[in-house]
């Protein structure tokens, strides 16, 4: 009985391993085929090849954005580039952002980045080098140090206290950005003309108009409608108008 | 006998031929089947032609005088007994003008024999009580019949062709038990009728009676000029049947519980004027606010599509507005694309209609799309108005080969922000080295645990701070009390010096020590004061001085001996207060 069980267990393990390897191979194959088709400027075929990848990584998403761009579907290209930014490296984020800016320019929606936005981008670029766990540990250490110094403060230790406070604030702000990125859902408006309604029905008055590739912050979902925030306004938008990043 | 029987049979045959003779008659009835001669303008009534005693089937009659009215044949009924049949043709007729009409004769040719009916005279009036109503006044439901009204109203009775007319229909009722089944809409030939809104409820006093009503509103657009009539609408409603018979309730489930009734509204007469002559092609009738145009993207390659959107906002029959023809420069061509309509949700907004065009550049260069014109008849100004868009500017670039469309910009150039080296039209290249599979996020402290770790040291420190602060505060408060006691003693001593009364000094110091040591006055003695000073590091010499001073003031207090050196003792007392202040 034991022998029979062991045998079937080994077979099962081997079978699982083979199927996983095959699946992985198939996904990689689709990715490489998509790249090849893209190089041959067969964007539609490349896109369907990328679509066939079961679990899409950021490179697949980014390449899909490129395909949509060449097929003149700019909102979808914007969406896929935005999706590819999650967990990406600095160089990959730079490429995706450059492409997104280009699409915005094409749609006549390009805005000059303000000082704050540039600072935030720099900040994000610094944060990429740290894992969330490292940030959390760094924060806790600096926080404890700050409290200790603050508690035992003599007049000569003021400078150390201030420096520790700055470190705590810097890391704390980074952690907050990470938390926001984890918890907040962002949607991209896919239709050319959309409206933000005061309630979850077309009969409600229009709060403000929305245009393609406008990003909205999703707060709630209800029966085919999303409650979203957009440039200080809060309203409702039909679920099929936006795509979640 | 045989002769008599034969003659009788012949007589019967003659009688039969005489009595069974084909006949035709014409009757005017209300829609409830009651004969009448007076009808209401715009309300339908029935004309029935009955052809009796004909063999076989008979064709439909032609009725003279009906051409002045709107006629629709609604049915044919035929019954046959012993070969002789009765055929009845029914027509629903509507007279849209007031006056007296002569309907008939109805003419039928049957077996080469022409049959002619009588001529009926109909008086078409405005709100003439019909016999049906008169009859109903006597019926059990007369009151209910009067308590139901249907009124048709329009906002404007003189309009031009294509102008919007807001019509509303109100169903007034008094009895809450009435159930409205259907609203019958007449046939409209000369009007374009839009869909009615959802009913709105309300109440109104008419001739001193309070009526509840349900109101529907819709838009009408006359299609031709002249005197037009909006025919009467009908409303079918159900009245609850009141059965007062004994055991009526037992059998009521076998019968219908309601009685169905119909009420007609008034018809509305409109004068529709034709549009004045215009040299320009007129696109619409109404009141329009603006026409705007925008094109996206303003820069495109040769052959690439750009979307031009014309947006017209205002009030009018948007369904009738067709996509305007664009006037474009020679370097551009266009195709019609989507058309969308955004209906105004409330009275403060205007409805909008958007026309999309795909514009293609045929020749490279900078082109100006001239202002697009929209001519309409303004119903508010009663004149033709031309709205114009602003001119648009587009730039058409030479088409680039397909190879050039693919990104050539290097990753490094993009990453370093060296965008000068990157051609404006290209995007960053394909990512062939990145992760094609998703990476699960790395482990991190759950947020609740993280917050706990953040809060714990803070709580510890805050707690210890509060503890320390409370001790300090307690100490501080005691110190302040002692300070206050010294201050009070000092002021009392000064007063004594002013009054040259040294007797009080003893009591002042006893009281002061009692306050400083927080003990009752009875426990304060010379020994106690000595210990107090010694505990606080005062030298023995000084304590000796204190002894002599204390004895002196005690003597002054109890011996009742007057001393001239009050000022001197007072000064010494103040010195001892200073010492006490220092050591507390």
Image (spheres, helix red, strand yellow):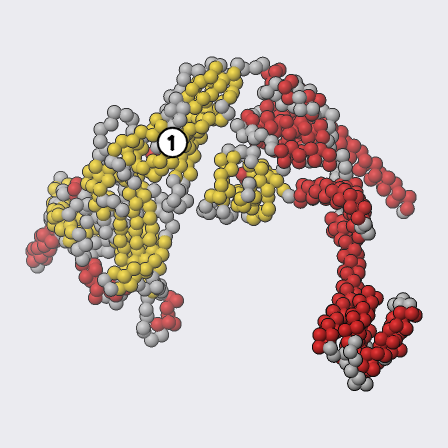
Is residue A33 visible from the viewing direction of this image? no
Q: Work out which residue is located at the far front of the displayed protein and give it.
A: B564
Tell me the residue that label 1 is attached to.
Answer: B291
Residue found 24% across the figure and 36% down from its top? B382
Q: Is residue A52 above or below residue B527?
A: above
**Which quarter of the rendered picture does the C terminus of chain B lie within?**
bottom right
Is residue B43 visible from the viewing direction of this image? yes
B549 or B149: nearer the eye? B549
| For residue A97, side relative to residue B539 (left or right) | left
Residue found 28% across the figure and 33% down from its top? B377
**Residues packed near mark 1 inside 10 Å, few (<14), some (14 to 19) or many (20 plus):** many
**Which quarter of the rendered picture does the N terminus of chain B lie within?**
bottom left
Residue B126 coordinates in the image, percent (x, y) = 17, 52
Using the image, name the chain to which the residue with label 1 belongs: B
Residue B242 coordinates in the image, percent (x, y) = 32, 69
Q: Is residue B260 above or below residue B403?
A: below
Q: How many marks?
A: 1
**Secondary structure beneath label 1:** strand
B491 or B453: nearer the eye? B491
| For residue B38, side relative to residue B545 (left or right) | left
B93 or B267: nearer the eye? B267
Residue B355 coordinates in the image, percent (x, y) = 41, 30
Residue B199 coordinates in the image, percent (x, y) = 36, 52
Quarter assignment of residue B131: bottom left
| For residue B425, side relative to residue B92 (left or right) | right
């Amino acid at each position: 009985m034991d022998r029979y069980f062991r045998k079937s267990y080994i077979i099962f393990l081997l079978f699982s391993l083979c199927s996983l390897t095959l699946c992985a191979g198939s996904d990689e194959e689709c990715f490489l085929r998509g790249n090849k088709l893209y190089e041959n400027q067969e964007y539609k075929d490349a896109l369907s090849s990328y679509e066939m990848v079961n679990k899409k990584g950021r490179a697949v998403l980014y390449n899909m954005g490129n395909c949509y761009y060449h097929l003149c579907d700019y909102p979808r290209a914007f969406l896929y580039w935005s999706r590819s930014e999650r967990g990406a490296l600095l160089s990959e984020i730079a490429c995706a952002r450059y492409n997104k800016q280009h699409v915005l320019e094409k749609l006549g929606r390009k805005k000059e980045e303000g000082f704050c936005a540039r600072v935030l981008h720099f900040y994000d670029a610094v944060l990429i080098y740290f894992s969330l766990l490292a940030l959390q540990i760094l924060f806790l250490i600096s926080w404890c140090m700050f409290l200790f110094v603050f508690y035992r403060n003599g007049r000569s230790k003021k400078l150390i206290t201030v420096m520790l406070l700055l470190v705590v604030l810097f890391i704390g702000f980074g952690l907050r950005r990470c938390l926001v990125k984890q918890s907040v859902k962002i949607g991209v408006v896919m239709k050319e003309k959309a409206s933000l309604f005061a309630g979850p029905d077309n009969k409600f008055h229009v709060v403000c108009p929305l245009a393609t590739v406008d990003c909205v912050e999703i707060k709630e979902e209800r029966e085919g409608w999303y409650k979203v925030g957009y440039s200080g306004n809060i309203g409702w938008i039909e679920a099929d108008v936006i795509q979640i990043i | 006998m045989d002769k008599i029987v034969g003659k009788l049979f012949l007589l019967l045959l003659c009688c039969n031929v005489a009595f069974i003779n084909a006949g035709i008659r014409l009757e005017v009835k209300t829609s409830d089947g009651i004969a009448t001669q007076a009808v209401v303008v715009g309300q339908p009534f029935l004309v029935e032609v009955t052809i009796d005693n004909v063999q076989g089937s008979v064709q439909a009659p032609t009725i003279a005088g009906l051409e002045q009215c709107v006629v629709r044949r609604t049915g044919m009924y035929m019954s046959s007994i012993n070969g002789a049949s009765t055929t009845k043709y029914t027509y629903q007729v509507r007279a849209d003008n007031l006056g007296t009409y002569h309907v008939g004769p109805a003419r039928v040719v049957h077996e080469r024999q022409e049959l002619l009916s009588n001529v009926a005279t109909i008086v078409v009036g405005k709100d003439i009580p019909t016999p049906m109503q008169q009859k109903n006044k006597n019926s059990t439901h007369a009151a209910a019949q009067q308590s139901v009204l249907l009124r048709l109203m329009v906002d404007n009775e003189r309009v031009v062709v294509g102008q919007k007319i807001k019509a509303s229909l109100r169903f007034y009722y008094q009895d809450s038990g009435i159930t409205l089944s259907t609203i019958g809409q007449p046939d409209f030939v000369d009007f374009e009728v839009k869909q009615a809104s959802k009913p709105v409820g309300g109440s109104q006093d008419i001739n001193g009676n309070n009526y509840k009503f349900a109101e529907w509103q819709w838009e009408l657009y006359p299609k031709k000029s002249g005197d037009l009539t909006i025919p009467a609408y009908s409303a079918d409603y159900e009245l609850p049947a009141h059965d007062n018979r004994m055991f009526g309730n037992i059998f009521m489930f076998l019968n219908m519980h309601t009685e169905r009734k119909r009420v007609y509204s008034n018809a509305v007469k409109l004068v529709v004027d034709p549009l004045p002559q215009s040299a320009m092609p007129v696109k619409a009738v109404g009141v329009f606010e603006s026409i705007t145009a925008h094109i996206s993207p303003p820069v495109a390659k040769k052959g690439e599509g750009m979307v031009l959107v014309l947006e017209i906002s205002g009030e009018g029959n948007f369904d009738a507005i067709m996509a305007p023809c664009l006037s474009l420069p020679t370097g551009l061509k266009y195709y019609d694309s989507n058309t969308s309509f955004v209906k105004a949700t409330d009275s403060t907004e205007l409805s909008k209609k958007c026309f999309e065009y795909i514009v293609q550049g045929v020749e490279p260069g900078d082109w100006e799309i001239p202002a697009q014109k929209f001519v309409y008849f303004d119903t508010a100004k009663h004149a033709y108005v031309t709205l114009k868009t602003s001119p648009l500017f587009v730039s058409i670039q030479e088409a680039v080969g397909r190879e050039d469309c693919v990104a050539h910009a290097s990753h490094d150039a993009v990453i370093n922000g060296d965008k000068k080296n990157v051609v404006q039209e290209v995007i960053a290249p394909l990512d062939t080295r990145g992760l094609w599979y998703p990476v699960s996020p790395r482990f991190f402290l759950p947020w609740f645990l993280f917050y706990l770790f953040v809060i714990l040291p803070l709580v510890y420190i805050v707690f210890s701070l509060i503890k320390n602060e409370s001790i300090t505060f307690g100490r501080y408060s005691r110190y302040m009390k002692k300070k206050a006691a010294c201050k009070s003693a000092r002021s009392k001593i000064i007063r004594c010096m002013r009054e040259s009364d040294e007797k009080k000094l003893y009591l002042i110091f006893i009281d002061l020590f009692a306050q400083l040591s927080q003990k009752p006055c009875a426990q304060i003695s010379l020994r106690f004061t000595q210990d107090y000073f010694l505990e606080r590091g005062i030298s023995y010499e000084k304590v000796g001085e204190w002894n002599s001073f204390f004895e002196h003031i005690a003597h002054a207090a109890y011996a009742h001996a007057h001393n001239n050196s009050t000022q001197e003792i007072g000064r010494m007392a103040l010195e001892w207060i200073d010492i006490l202040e220092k050591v507390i």
